[in-house]
Image: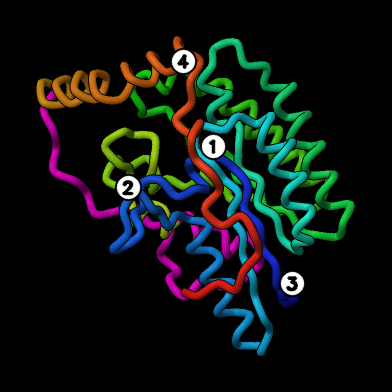
Amino acid sequence: MRPRPFTRFVALGDSFTEGLDDPQPDQTNAYVGWADRLAGHLARSASEDDRSFGYANLAVRGRLLDDIAGRQVDDALALEPDLVSIVGGGNDILRPRADIDALAAKLEDAVSRVRATGADVLLATPVDPRDAPLMKATRGRAAIYTAHIWSIARRHDAHVIDQWGMAALRDWRLWAPDRIHMTPEGHRRVALNAFTALGFTAEDAGWADPLPAAAPISRIDAARANAQWAREYVGPWVQRRLRGQSSGDAISPKRPTVTPFED
């Protein structure tokens, strides 16, 4: 069975879908990311069948699921897409008092609204944080949210990017120094994961393969790296939380309307 021939893709979410830390060549503070890369694959597929293809990306760093499942979905539906990716909840899960069942209900309502228009929906599970310092404390919440995502997808016939089961993503070489955002290679692999989740065949069949083994690191070096990470990234994040600020407060969507995608 051939995959659906998508022509209007709208991506919703936070910094992951905005594309941090996959820098746009020759542009300052501009990012590519997995969603842009997926749009490139879909555009090439459309061109093979002489179809037009347009893409919008409404994701903004720091956004919580309330915004993604609310305002972003409203804005997306106004663009009349036939494919919408809704990837969010990660910023909520970081909060110890997060109600995961309530998050899942918000996500399902968003999925239901999009599916009611006839558009397809692409979701994504969280990455398994079992090897991440500090972040591994959220593993239980992330696992429950992952289970909800698969159930939502089944009930609404949505597609899912299985990041939890993507063992390659547990390699820190696919992550930026902040350990929250992916490198260009990480985004490239997730885009191929998404492309196959939509029913297409990726030219690179090895997107899920682990990287070659890395040289071992001593406990002392690991401890120093963890301490530096905490100083440079965890501290500023906590300070923003205390001030009630978000990294995306002054950021606008990078592709607010559906326009032809040039790979």
Q: Position of residue 252 (x, y in %)?
A: 54, 44
Marks 4/1: CA distance? 22 Å
User: Earlier along the polypeptide chain: callout 2 or callout 4?
Assistant: 2
Q: Residue at x 76, y 64 (%)?
A: 82
Give the vertical position of 33 relative to 59 (above or below).
below
Q: Secondary structure at mark 1?
A: loop
Residue denoted by label 1: 126
* 205 displayed left or right of 119: left
Question: What residue is shown at x 63% (from left), y 80% (from top)?
Answer: 46
Label ID, residue 101: none
Element carrying mark 3? loop
Q: Which residue is mark 4?
A: 241
- In terms of sequence position, does the residue under pointer 4 or pointer 1 come before the other? 1
Inter-mark Cα distance, 3 to 1: 25 Å
Tag 2 and tag 3, C-beta contact below 8 Å? no
In this view, the mark in front (2 or 4): 4
Three-letter amino acid code of the residue under disc 2: Leu
Residue range corresponding to the magenta coloring: 190-219
**Type of amino acid at the residue the image marks with label 4:** Arg
Residue at 57% from the left image edge and 33% from the top image edge: 63
From the image, tell me which residue sits under label 3: 4
* Residue 215 placement (x, y as % from top left): 13, 43
Colour pattern:
rainbow
Reply yes or no: does residue 192 show up in magenta. Answer: yes
How many residues crowd around disc 4 within 10 Å: few (fewer than 14), some, or many (20 or more)? few
Front one among 24 and 158: 24
Res. 256 visible in picture: yes
On screen, residue 247 versus residue 171, left or right, reads: right
